[in-house]
């Protein structure tokens, strides 16, 4: 924006002179676009556990390779720690208060205009293959627009095999047919139980007493157990084994895409719904209760061989709402000028960053929330939490406490793990961050909450996943 404002101002001044037209900004260069889209999302994949984001060597070779072949956004943020809310934000480019999907028991408004609906309307064949019960169709509404097929299945290896088969034999094979495929992998979501080969991959010689069974992990949170570093390291090693499992699945899809000769025509977008607290706050190993960076910081990688410059990194603070407008631009899908203003994307097209043609024109803030009770706002230097009603979220295990102060402020540079609340020491910063937060909230057009139709079994399944919503 700054560049355009300066150019416009210079033109106003120059308008007093006869040569103004020479100073008009040149039209934006035409950027390469893609024919197809492969969107891969991974549940609970906290960015900093990937090696290409600073995590363990060997945790994520295929994802590291994808990043090396495309652009890696180093500072992308999710709006909360709830699968359905975050994926609804990804698919609509609207914040949870706007979609009204602020937890996993609410349903997407059929009046929203999702990525799949937009691409289907543009002639794409849109298909989804997902592992996570909260994404089941006829309940969440997240399947809206996937008219080419939508299959939820808890078995990730099955989903990967199915998608590989499609990439090999079907995807991109019909002349003039554009394709959109969404794949969502559930690992590394709780329970922390990757296949045996991955369970011991990073810590084969552990002889301590800690295991990663759900009752153990939940017990640590409920009892606020003080873990020895060696035991914590073991849990993290198992967790990273899950990351490696998913990375290998992603790698198998990428290999198949390459063998099918689809690398150049296909935009691959890789991201996550949210991250995970891994004993960073309140002895918690989960995500639904937390607003901290451990839960909101997610990976975002875009790759299109031969089109997107390889091996680049962008450090701008961006959000999941920015993904959909970027995808639409890269697929050359225009937004109709007649579209209902209520369904327009709220995010920003990141294409200038993808191609290095300029700075991305967006607010330097990211926002997050717990239900519509507690909110977080961050920029590159500060993270502020506003919890005016002393909301305390309740999740599985229900007896666990996740206290949040009424006001929290963290210095992101000096305290990147957000451990020391310095709000009373920097009231000036807190005031400014709260103003930014309130300005953003005032601009939200809140949607109407629609409850899902759930059976008793659905509710029990959600509880097993740790998603019961609510709080006190
Ligand atoms: Zn999730």
Image: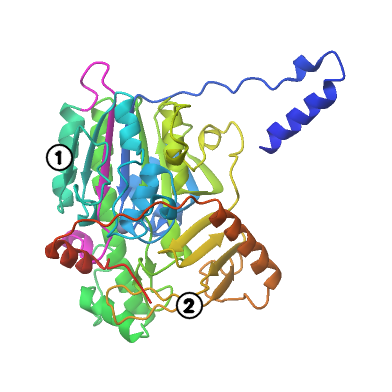
Question: How far from the left and from the top, in percent, is residue 225?
Answer: 34, 85
- Report which quarter residue 303 is drawn in: top left
Nearest to the observer: residue 349 or residue 62? 349
Q: Secondary structure at mark 1?
A: helix
Nearest to the observer: residue 230 or residue 276? 276
Q: Which residue is mark 1?
A: 162
Q: Which residues are magenta?
A: 171-199
Task: Between label 2 and label 1, give the one nearer the viewer.
Answer: 2
Direction from residue 14 to residue 192 in the image, left or right: left
Q: Residue at x 23, y 41 (%)?
A: 252
**Number of numbered labels in the structure image:** 2
- In the drawing, what numbered circle is on residue 390? 2
Q: Residue at x 38, y 77 (%)?
A: 472
Question: How far from the left and from the top, in percent, is residue 451?
Answer: 27, 57
- In the drawing, what numbered circle is on residue 45? none
In the rendered view, would you say 217 is above or below 56? below
Picture quarter with the N terminus: top right
State yes or no: Cβ of the residue under disc 1 lies below 8 Å from any atom of ligand 1.
no
Q: Residue at x 31, y 34 (%)?
A: 117
Nearest to the observer: residue 177 or residue 207? 177
Residue 189: in magenta span: yes
Magenta stretch, main secondary structure, is loop
In the rendered view, would you say 393 is above or below 72? below
């Amino acid at each position: 924006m700054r560049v355009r404002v300066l150019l416009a101002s210079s033109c106003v001044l120059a308008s007093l002179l006869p040569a103004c037209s020479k100073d008009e900004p040149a039209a934006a260069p035409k950027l390469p676009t893609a024919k197809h889209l492969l969107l891969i999302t991974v549940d609970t994949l906290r960015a900093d556990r990937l090696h290409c984001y600073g995590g363990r060597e060997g945790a994520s070779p295929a994802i590291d390779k994808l990043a090396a072949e495309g652009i890696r956004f180093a500072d992308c943020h999710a709006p909360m720690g709830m699968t359905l809310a975050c994926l609804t934000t990804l698919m609509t480019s609207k914040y949870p208060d706007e979609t009204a999907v602020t937890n996993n028991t609410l349903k997407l408004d059929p009046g929203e205009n999702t990525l799949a609906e937009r691409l289907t309307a543009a002639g794409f064949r849109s298909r989804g293959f997902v592992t996570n019960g909260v994404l089941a169709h006829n309940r969440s509404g997240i399947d809206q627009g996937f008219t080419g097929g939508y299959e939820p299945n808890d078995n990730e290896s099955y989903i990967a095999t199915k998608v590989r088969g499609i990439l090999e034999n079907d995807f991109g094979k019909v002349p003039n047919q554009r394709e959109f495929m969404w794949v969502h992998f559930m690992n590394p979501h709780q329970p922390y139980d990757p296949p045996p080969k991955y369970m011991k991959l990073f810590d084969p010689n552990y002889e301590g007493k800690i295991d990663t069974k759900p009752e153990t992990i939940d017990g640590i949170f409920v009892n606020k157990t003080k873990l020895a570093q060696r035991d914590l390291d073991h849990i993290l090693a198992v967790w990273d084994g899950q990351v490696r499992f998913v990375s290998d699945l992603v790698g198998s899809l990428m290999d198949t895409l390459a063998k099918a000769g689809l690398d150049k025509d296909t935009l691959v977008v890789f991201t996550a719904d949210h991250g995970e607290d891994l004993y960073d706050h309140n002895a918690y190993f989960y995500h639904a209760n937390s607003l901290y960076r451990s839960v909101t910081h997610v990976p975002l990688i875009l790759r299109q061989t031969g089109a997107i410059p390889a091996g680049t990194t962008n450090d701008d603070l961006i959000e999941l709402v920015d993904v959909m407008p970027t995808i639409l631009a890269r697929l050359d899908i225009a937004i109709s000028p007649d579209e209902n203003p209520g369904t327009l994307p709220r995010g920003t097209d990141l294409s200038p960053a993808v191609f290095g043609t300029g700075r991305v024109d967006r607010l330097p803030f990211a926002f997050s929330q717990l239900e519509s009770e507690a909110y977080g706002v961050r920029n590159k230097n500060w993270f502020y939490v506003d919890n005016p009603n002393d909301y305390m979220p309740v999740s599985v295990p229900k007896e666990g406490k996740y206290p949040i102060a009424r006001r929290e402020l963290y210095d992101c540079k000096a305290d990147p793990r957000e451990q020391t609340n310095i709000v009373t020491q920097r009231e000036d910063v807190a005031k400014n961050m709260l103003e930014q937060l309130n300005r953003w909230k005032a601009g939200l057009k809140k949607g109407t909450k629609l409850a899902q139709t759930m059976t008793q079994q659905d509710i029990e399944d959600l509880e097993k996943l740790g998603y019961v919503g609510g709080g006190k």
